[in-house]
């Protein structure tokens, strides 16, 4: 937490002031400020120097930026050392100007655990209470990600074999229908919703990161990270298949959409 040097941190505050002076437009600033505003935003080892926190507070005042608060974990960084050398602090935050807050009155900040960093992700949700649009009924498509699970083959075999003993020389539709229903049921109850599973593992990682650092804790954390990586691989396979299907269906007009999705995934992996 003591790097970069204090002198360089002053340069950061001055840069923020310069950016603020250049425009009076609505502004939000999100990321790792490498500083805290108050004593209670740090836990462990030596207390933060008051003058350093004062400089940060003064910078936000000069830039007319206000801390947006947060939901979730109180600390966004940990040095991952065992007691008594463990340090946690809220180094990452979102700050905005009043006119930005007026534009997005429902905006909420969430501190989200990540598997590949000692920092938590600061996620700004602009419309957390927005009502989702009703989903259209979709055609059944075999998901390539299912092949990553050995049990998928068992589901297909168990649903297809009994059907294949019947007279299906003229019509295999009943077998296909039986297999389809079995796969959908297996996907719902066993393979599961990947996004939901990732959220569950994310919460597990978050809880472990907030807990005491120990050998057992580290082992569980590494196991959870590996599980999240596997789920991310499955999700990526699903996105590839979905992208290909929509590309074939709608052509070039989707290119901008999928480029945006690819960029979004790369950014998530870098956090």
Image (spheres, grey):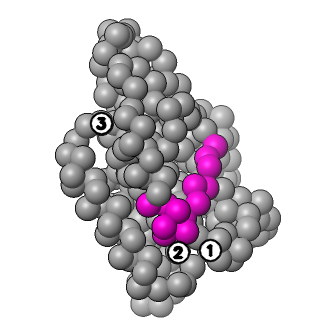
Image position, residue 138 (x, y; %): 67, 67
Q: Is residue 61 magenta?
A: yes
Marks 3 and 2, how far apart in space?
27 Å
Residue 22 as seen in the image, left or right of residue 108: left
Marks 1 and 2: CB-CB under 8 Å?
yes
Circle 1 Cα neighbour tier, 10 Å, few/some/many (<14 / 14–19 / ≥20): some
Residue position for label 3: 1
Residue beneath the point at 60% across and 38% down: 72
Q: Nearer the viewer, residue 118 or 173?
A: 118
Residue position for label 2: 27
Residue position for label 1: 100
Marks 1 and 3: CB-CB under 8 Å?
no
* Magenta residues (range): 59-71
Circle 3 Cα neighbour tier, 10 Å, few/some/many (<14 / 14–19 / ≥20): some
Residue beneath the point at 20% across and 46% down: 5
Residue 160, by quadrant, is: top right
């Amino acid at each position: 937490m003591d790097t970069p040097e204090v002198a360089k941190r002053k340069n950061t505050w001055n840069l923020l002031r310069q950016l603020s002076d250049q425009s009076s437009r609505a502004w939000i600033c999100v990321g790792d400020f490498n500083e805290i505003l108050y004593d209670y935003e740090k836990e462990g080892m030596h207390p933060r120097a008051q003058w350093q926190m004062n400089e940060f507070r003064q910078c936000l005042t000069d830039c007319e930026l206000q801390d947006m608060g947060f939901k979730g974990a109180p600390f966004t960084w940990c040095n991952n050392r065992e007691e008594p050398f463990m340090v946690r602090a809220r180094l990452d935050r979102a700050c905005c100007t009043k006119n930005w807050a007026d534009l997005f009155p429902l905006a909420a900040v969430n501190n989200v655990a990540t598997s590949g960093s000692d920092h938590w992700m600061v996620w700004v949700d602009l419309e957390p209470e927005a009502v989702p649009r009703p989903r259209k009924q979709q055609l059944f498509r075999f998901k390539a990600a299912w092949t990553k699970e050995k049990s998928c083959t068992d589901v297909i075999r168990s649903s297809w074999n009994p059907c294949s003993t019947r007279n299906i020389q003229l019509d295999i539709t009943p077998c296909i229908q039986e297999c389809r229903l079995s796969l959908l049921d297996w996907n719902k109850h066993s393979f599961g919703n990947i996004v939901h599973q990732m959220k569950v593992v994310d919460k597990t990682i978050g809880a472990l990161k907030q807990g005491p650092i120990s050998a057992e804790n580290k082992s569980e954390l590494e196991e959870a990270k590996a599980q999240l990586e596997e789920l991310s691989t499955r999700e990526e396979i699903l996105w590839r298949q979905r992208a290909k299907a929509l590309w074939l269906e709608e052509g070039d007009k989707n290119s901008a959409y999928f480029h945006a999705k690819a960029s979004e995934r790369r950014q998530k992996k870098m956090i």
